[in-house]
Image: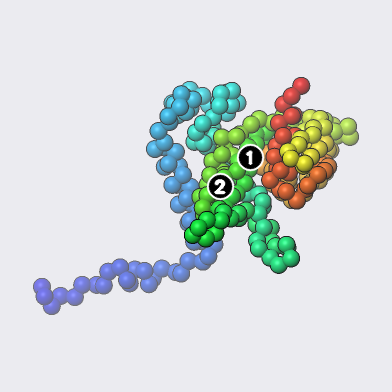
């Protein structure tokens, strides 16, 4: 027995495999993430009354869930296939006040020990006809983003969509039903219905919100301090929420 040679295990097997390309690795990672999320949802133990009903399958429609306040982000995960995006609210450091736009806003607190940095982040989630905006702060970047996404899910609200541009008769809900105006701080955002094929006539950060909300065509006018993305985004959500009035 001692002289018998075993075929080398493991190493040889690995050598026969082709090296994975970057795209494949990325894909595998995404799949793993999805699996993890699915598992987390399955293991999720709801705490609130609403959460229990959703988990048990008694509530299947997000609009029914939205009648009461959503306190658990998993409710939204279960009921809705959401898209998400991160808004660039921060700025990298640069000389003379200039710096590249960045997803994380970095602020500092002065203490005896030195400067303590805090990161904040703004996320928008939604699908066709729903949108939510969230703001999160943490000592590091990634937890800040996680908090922002979580809050965005909790802030989810319904918006009304229609085809109501005067020169469009397609009848599909691709724009907002009427002119709405929202405000936050000094920022003002006015959204106007547009004909099909117009696209989103808005700034880049506003476009992200409108795209996630499922709006395809809209004109916009902004006033006030437009560089404050934080307030611009809030104003845009304020405007969108007004589509439900009337
Ligand atoms: Zn139309």
Picture residue at 54% right of the left edge, 62% below the top: 23
Quadrant location of residue 66? top right
Q: Provide the secondary structure element on which disc 2 rests.
A: strand
Q: x and y percent of residue 205 in the render? A: 72, 49
Is there any visible trace of residue 181 in the rendered image? yes
Residue hosting label 1: 133
Q: Residue furthest front?
A: 112
Q: On the rendered structure, is 4 left or right of 71? A: left
Q: Is residue 14 above or below residue 136?
A: below
Q: On the rendered structure, is 5 left or right of 152? A: left
**Residue closest to the eye, 198 or 192:** 192
Picture residue at 88% right of the left edge, 32% below the top: 166
Respond yes or no on whether mark 1 lies under 8 Å from ligand 1. Answer: no
Q: On the rendered structure, is 153 left or right of 32? A: right
Is there any visible trace of residue 83 in the rendered image? no
**Residue closest to the eye, 60 or 66:** 66
Question: Count of labels shown?
Answer: 2
Picture residue at 76% right of the left edge, 36% below the top: 183
Number of other residues with Cα within 10 Å of mark 2, as a class: few under 14, some 14 to 19, many 20 or more: many
Q: x and y percent of residue 59 in the render? A: 51, 24
Task: For the C terminus, give its image quadrant.
Answer: top right
Q: x and y percent of residue 76 in the render? A: 54, 34
Q: On the rendered structure, is 186 left or right of 93? A: right
Q: CA distance from mark 2 to mark 1?
A: 14 Å
Q: Provide the secondary structure element on which disc 1 rests.
A: strand
Picture residue at 44% right of the left edge, 38% below the top: 41
Quadrant location of residue 181? top right
Q: Is residue 160 above or below residue 229?
A: above
Q: Residue furthest left?
A: 1
Q: Residue furthest right?
A: 167
Residue hosting label 2: 137
Quadrant location of residue 223? top right
């Amino acid at each position: 027995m001692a002289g018998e040679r075993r075929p080398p295990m493991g190493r040889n097997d690995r050598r026969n495999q082709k090296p994975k390309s970057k795209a494949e690795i990325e894909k595998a990672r995404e799949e793993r993430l999805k699996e993890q999320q699915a598992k987390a949802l399955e293991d999720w133990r709801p705490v609130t009354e609403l959460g229990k009903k959703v988990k048990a399958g008694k509530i299947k429609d997000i609009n029914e869930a939205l009648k009461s306040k959503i306190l658990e982000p998993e409710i939204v995960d279960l009921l809705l296939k959401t898209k998400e995006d991160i808004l660039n609210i921060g700025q990298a450091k640069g000389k003379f006040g200039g710096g590249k736009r960045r997803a994380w806003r970095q602020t500092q607190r002065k203490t005896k020990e030195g400067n303590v940095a805090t990161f904040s982040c703004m996320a928008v989630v939604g699908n066709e006809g729903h949108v939510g905006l969230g703001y999160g702060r943490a000592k590091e970047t990634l937890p800040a983003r996680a908090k922002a996404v979580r809050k965005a899910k909790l802030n989810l609200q319904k918006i009304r969509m229609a085809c109501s541009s005067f020169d469009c008769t397609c009848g599909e809900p691709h724009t907002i039903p009427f002119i709405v105006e929202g405000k936050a701080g000094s920022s003002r955002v006015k959204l106007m219905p547009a004909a099909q094929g117009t696209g989103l006539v808005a700034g880049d950060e506003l476009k992200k919100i409108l795209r996630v909300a499922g709006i395809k065509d809209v004109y916009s006018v902004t006033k006030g301090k437009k560089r404050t993305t934080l307030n611009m985004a809030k104003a845009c959500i304020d405007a969108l929420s007004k589509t439900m009035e009337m």
